[in-house]
Amino acid sequence: MCLRMNKMATMTSFRNRLTQLEARLKAENDQEGESRNTASRALRTDVASSRPTIRGLPIGQEHGSPGRSGRFPSQRSGRFPSQRSACLPLSLPPCNYSPTSHDSFCSTNHHMESKLKKIYQHAGILTIDGETYQSSIDDMIHMGELGTGTCGHVVKMEHRPSRKIMAVKQMRRSGNTEENKRITMDLDVVLSCQDCPHIVQCFGYFITDSDVWICMELMSTCLDKLIKRLKKPIPEMILGKIAVATVNALHYLKEKHGVIHRDVKPSNILLDERGVIKLCDFGISGRLVDSKARTRSAGCAAYMAPERIDPPNPSRPDYDIRADVWSLGISLVELATNRFPYQGCNNDFEVLSKVLQEDPPHLPPDGDFSLDFCSFVRDCLIKDFEKRPKYRKLLEHPFIKRMQTTPDGVAAWFAFVMKTTQVPVVSPLCRHWNK
C-alpha cells in the first residue's frame, strides 16, 4: 500500500511539473507572437514592401525545410506531418543576465544598443573572394525565396558588383530586446567564426532603420530537406562525416568563443555539392558563464535534452554543452532511420513527456549499423547529463576517429541523390500550415 501511494505521489508530482511547463510554453509562445506582431507593425512601408513574402522553410537552395522545426512525426509516415506546432522561444537573455530589477534590464538593453551601434559602423562592407566591396542593399538582386531561420527570412540574392550568389538572412530590427539580442548574437557568431571550416561563412551585412541583412555563403540544402527528398535513411558513412563536422563546429564554438548553439537539428546542418558540411543559425545561441548556460527557453522541444526540460536543481537550472550533444544524438537517430525517435506525438508537450519518461532512443539492432556508430549514438543520448561526454571525449571516440580517416564520399553520394531523386511536391494545405 505504501509503495503504491509513493508511486502515485511521484506520478502526480511529474504531471504537475509538466503541466506547469506546458503553461509556461504557451505563455512564452503568446508573448513571442505579440513581440513579432509589434515588430512587424513597426516596419517602414518602403522596406517592408521590397521584401518578398517567405513561406518556404529551408536554409538551402531547396524549399520546404524548417528553420525552427516544431513539427512531429505522424504514426503513418514515421516523419513529420504538415501540421504546425509550437517551438520553445527565447524568453530570457542567453548570458549571465537575470531580470531581477529594472536597472539590470535597462543595463542589458543599453548594452545591446551599444553593440548594435558598433556593428553599424561596419555595415555595407562585404568581403568576397578576397575582394572588399563598399555596397548598399541596392546592389543586391533578389533571385528567390529560401526559407525562414530562427529570427529572419532567408532569400537567394546576387551581389551585382561581384556577381556572387549568396543567401541573405533578413532580420527585423525593433525596440524588442529579445529580437535585438538574437540579431547581435547571430552576427557575433558568424563574423567571429571565419576561420572555422565547419560553420557557414559570412561575407558582411547591411543595416537599415528596420532591418539587418546578413550575407552568407549559399549552401545546397539542409539535412532535413535532404532526407525528405531521399525518403530513406542516410548511409552511416555519410552520417559519420556529418558527426565529425558537427562535433568539430560545436567544439570550436565552445573553446574559441564560449558559445553553446542550443538549436542543433537536421535543418541547421547544411550541405553543398562539394560535400562540405556546415552548421548554421546562431540566433538563439548563448554565451557560457563558467561553462554553463543560464536559461532553458530556447530551441525546439523535439531535440531538447532532458536536463533543459526538467533541471535536477530547479533553483539553478544551468546546463552546458552536453545539451547540444543530446540534440546531435537525436538528429543522428532520425537521419539514420528516417524516423523521428519519439513516435505518436502530436505536439511539443507530448514529446517532452516522452523525453522525460522513456528510455533514451537508440539505433535499431537490425539496422546493420557498426558497433562503434551505435556506441557513439548511445554516448550522445545518455540521459544523465553528468555522465554524457563532452566534445573532447567525443572527438576521441573510435567512431569519430574512424570517420576522420575514411575517404570522403559525401560529394559523390550527394550528386547521386540529387540526380536520382525529385524534390517532394508540397501540397497547398502543407503551404498553409507552414506559413
Image: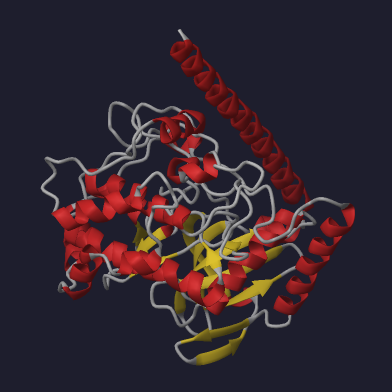
Q: Position of residue 365 (x, y in %)?
A: 14, 41
Left or right of 333, for residue 82: right
Residue 228 visible here: no
Task: Examine the image and state in which quarter residue 37 appears.
Answer: top right
Residue in view at x 56 percent, y 70 percent: 258
Left or right of 66, for residue 116: right
Q: How many numbered marks are there? A: 0
- Give whichever of 219, 291 is nearer the camera: 291
- Give whichever of 388, 373 is nearer the camera: 388
Residue in view at x 45 percent, y 34 percent: 356
Residue in view at x 41 percent, y 49 percent: 65
Position of 233 relative to 242 (above/below)? above
Position of 435 relative to 53 (above/below)? above
Q: Of all residues shown, which one is farthest toward the right?
A: 103
- Give whichever of 138, 87 is nearer the camera: 87
Q: Position of residue 298 (x, y in %)?
A: 58, 49
Q: Of all residues shown, which one is farthest toward the bottom?
A: 131
- Give whichever of 393, 1 is nearer the camera: 1
Left or right of 61, for residue 243: left
Where, quadrant-wise, is the N terminus in this rendering? top left
Q: Position of residue 186 (x, y in %)?
A: 59, 66
Q: Of all residues shown, which one is farthest toward the front?
A: 2
Query: What scheme was used to colour the molecule?
Result: secondary structure
Residue 345 visible here: yes
Q: Position of residue 386 (x, y in %)?
A: 44, 52
